[in-house]
Image (cartoon, rainbow, N blue to C red):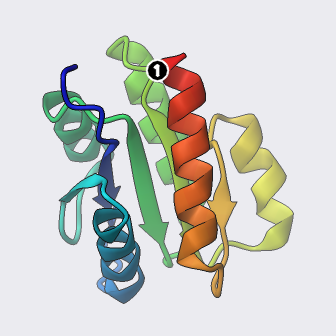
Amino acid sequence: MADNKIRVVVAKPGLDGHDRGAKVIARAFRDSGMEVIYTGLRQTPEQIVETAIQEDADAIGLSILSGAHEHYFSAIVELLKQKNASDIVVFGGGVIPESDIPHLLEIGAGAIFGPGTPTTECIEWLEKTVSRKRG
């Protein structure tokens, strides 16, 4: 890839209609020099994975406030495996109980960022993770 910019898909899976956080993080990623593809509201796991593959994304950032985080992380990680795209990093944020985070990491999430996490922390994590992935 001639352009070394990080390409990240920011997605809002499911029926949750609150996208302020997703827009804040998408703007922060863009302002830090990343290429951001924001999928908009009410996306299915299939749509999110398809967008990430079509856009040659390095990562998928999920914003989940609905309580269905385990379902969406599992579905997206599994679809990426099925499509031989497991190199796409999946991470997320939103209202996710602290007690659920270890399981999400176990099933393949790279990181979970809770409410109030500084955007700089998310940016630094993504830059380091993609840099390691690219080798």
Looking at this view, is 65 or 4 the one in front? 4
Q: Residue furthest top?
A: 84
Q: Residue furthest left?
A: 54
Report x, y in % for residue 23. Answer: 30, 79
The residue drawn where x is 22% and y is 19% is 1
In the rendered structure, the answer to whether residue 73 lies left or right of residue 7 reads right
Report x, y in % for residue 56. Answer: 22, 29
Question: Can residue 67 be spotted in the picture?
Answer: no
Report x, y in % for residue 7. Answer: 29, 43
Kindly identify the amino acid type of the residue bearing the numbered disc 1.
Answer: Ser
The residue drawn where x is 19% and y is 44% is 47
Q: Which residue is mark 1?
A: 86
In the rendered structure, the answer to whether residue 31 lies left or right of residue 135 reads left
Q: Is residue 1 above or below residue 72?
A: above
Looking at this view, is 36 or 64 the one in front? 36
- How many numbered callouts? 1
In the rendered structure, the answer to whether residue 25 lies left or right of residue 115 reads left
Q: Which image quadrant is residue 99 in?
A: bottom right
Looking at this view, is 23 or 70 the one in front? 23
The residue drawn where x is 76% and y is 37% is 106
Q: Which image quadrant is residue 128 in?
A: top right
Report x, y in % for residue 105. Answer: 73, 43
Q: Is residue 92 above or below residue 6?
A: below
Mark 1 Cα within 10 Å, few/some/many (few <14, many 20+)?
Answer: some
The residue drawn where x is 50% and y is 78% is 65
Question: Can residue 88 be spotted in the picture?
Answer: yes
Q: Quadrant of the C terminus?
A: top right
Q: Secondary structure at mark 1?
A: loop
Q: Is residue 5 above or below residue 44?
A: above
Q: Is residue 109 above or below residue 66?
A: above
